[in-house]
Amino acid sequence: MGTFREATALTVRGDGEFGAVLDAQWSVGTRLHGGYLLAVLGRAACESAAGAGHPHVSAVSGSFIEPPEPGEAVARVETLRVGRSVAQVRAALVQQGRTRVEAHITLGLLDDSGPWWSAHEPVALPPEQDCLLVPVDPPGAGFSVPLMAVVEERIDPDHLAFAFGSPSMRGLVATWQRLADGSDWDPLSLLVALDPVPPVSFDLGLSGWVPTIQLSAYIRRLPAPGPIRVRLTATDVGGDRMDEVAHVWDDKGRLVAQATQLAAVRLPA
Amino acid sequence: MGTFREATALTVRGDGEFGAVLDAQWSVGTRLHGGYLLAVLGRAACESAAGAGHPHVSAVSGSFIEPPEPGEAVARVETLRVGRSVAQVRAALVQQGRTRVEAHITLGLLDDSGPWWSAHEPVALPPEQDCLLVPVDPPGAGFSVPLMAVVEERIDPDHLAFAFGSPSMRGLVATWQRLADGSDWDPLSLLVALDPVPPVSFDLGLSGWVPTIQLSAYIRRLPAPGPIRVRLTATDVGGDRMDEVAHVWDDKGRLVAQATQLAAVRLPA
């Protein structure tokens, strides 16, 4: 089983072009995980010319165009602007000549200082050992989640009512997360954490596949070592669309990342 | 004073290229308003080949690269994918050969049906006539806001403590909004409403300019005629960055649009 770093490793092909090998381990069902794909593009942005002096991803907005397959892919980075405090690039993940994911990425220099002002307390969760490890083969899901072998996710048992056929209908799923390879979270791996499994639709009694259309993530500061707490909520479900809003706090209780995504959802007729 | 439709009108130049005339009326201080610029790009996307059968903007993620000037500009639209229910494009606003704003835009077909599930009630606001019209020249602001002549914004008087030197520090500003030209809100003009004035930083005692770095907007359904209610909040301010989260409800109390932006903010030393 490869580490996160290995699964997102790139080879330089020159002139903003990188080779990647997309690792099927970072999949949900048979589809590569959206946060993982953005992490590959984020690493390409950081390793591009624009990343010099701007070593961290700060904002990533990705459009999911066509699901890529596991295996070789090309990441192409085009610099839009390099400023004093930020650099902005466009990054595309290409396979067989077709763009599968395209993102705008803002790079900067993050630190681990706390917030000047904050509205939210970290999501309340029982201690890690009292939460339930999400298995690779969730009972009754009908598909396996290889991602759960590389991301250790422990779900609040109070948020698992959906698994017993009585979803809470609150639109809330909270989890502890660690990387199974033992490495600490960093701005790139946080992109994986911001696109959690299961989708919040499970808590609304909707068990189907929820493909991401667009996802925007902000990395707010460098995370402390240790596990992270992730809160996933929805605001509105209708017209075959759902929004998912993720907030991530580090082991010191500071918000380190947040994301919003628009996803397609199949509603009961 | 031009209407919203006139201020975002385009001339077809062929092959996904459109001419625009950016209208200084849609400015905050001397800078063109970010939501207005995304509306121009949104209209270009809708009028491009990808817009056939997908007439409405559904998701817009914009990267603000260099502020454009009022006057002539070119909007270039490149189709990324045209599917059954969505079309995805990249749109760039170009002046003097330089890309000023670039966006990924997802197009679709919206309707005015209500949500299947919703987490939020519309923000509580006093009746419109009991709220205060935001003037073009806010006392003590030190700059004028021409946008307030074309967008009628009425702010909850309870959220105006900042104007008297005692910001509430809740990180909340709620407003009623109407287009001054009398037209009803539509998916494109909602992009303007999603980037409200004043920024929520004013409610945190930070009076300076807050340039948007990246903004992601989702239009969830077609708005009913009449005014909209807009709630603007922040989650975390630190490291010279602030997030702003906007929700917009129509006159029937349904969520019609939401946005998240990452903005630069100057914090007290």
Image: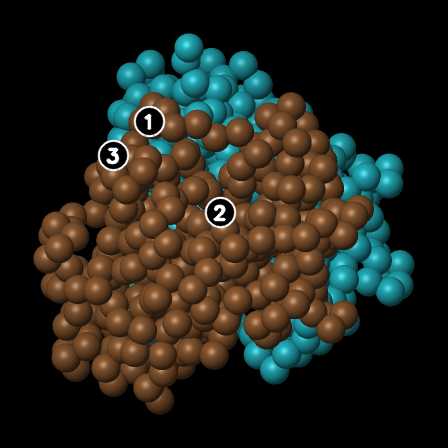
Chain colours: A brown, B cyan
Chain on which label 1 sits: A
Q: Quadrant of the N terminus of chain A?
A: bottom left
| Residue A180 in view of the camera | yes
Quadrant of the rendered structure where residue A148 is? bottom left
- Circle 1 is placed at which residue position? A114
Q: Would you name the residue on which mark 3 appears? A: A252
- The answer to whether marks 1 and 3 mark residues whose Cβ atoms lie closer than 8 Å is yes
Q: Sort mark 3 into few (<14), some (14-19) or many (20+) by Cα contacts within 10 Å.
A: some
Residue type (three-letter) at the residue carrying disc 1: Gly
> Residue at point 72% right, 49% down?
A12
Q: Are marks 2 and 3 in contact (CB under 8 Å)?
A: no
Tag 3 secondary structure: loop
B206 or B131, which lies in front?
A: B206
Q: Which residue is mark 2?
A: A188
Disc 3 marks which amino acid? Lys
The image shows residue B79 at horizontal and vertical percentages of 74, 67
Tell me how far mark 1 sits from mark 2, CA to CA: 19 Å
Residue A169 in picture, x, y percent from top left:
20, 70
What amino acid is found at the position of numbered circle 2 in the picture? Leu
Counting from the top left corner in percent of width and height, residue B73 is at 81, 43
Closer to the eye: label 1 or 3: 3
Alpha carbon distance from label 1 to label 3: 9 Å
Which of pointers 1 and 3 lies earlier in the amino acid sequence? 1
User: Do labels 1 and 2 touch, CB within 8 Å?
Assistant: no
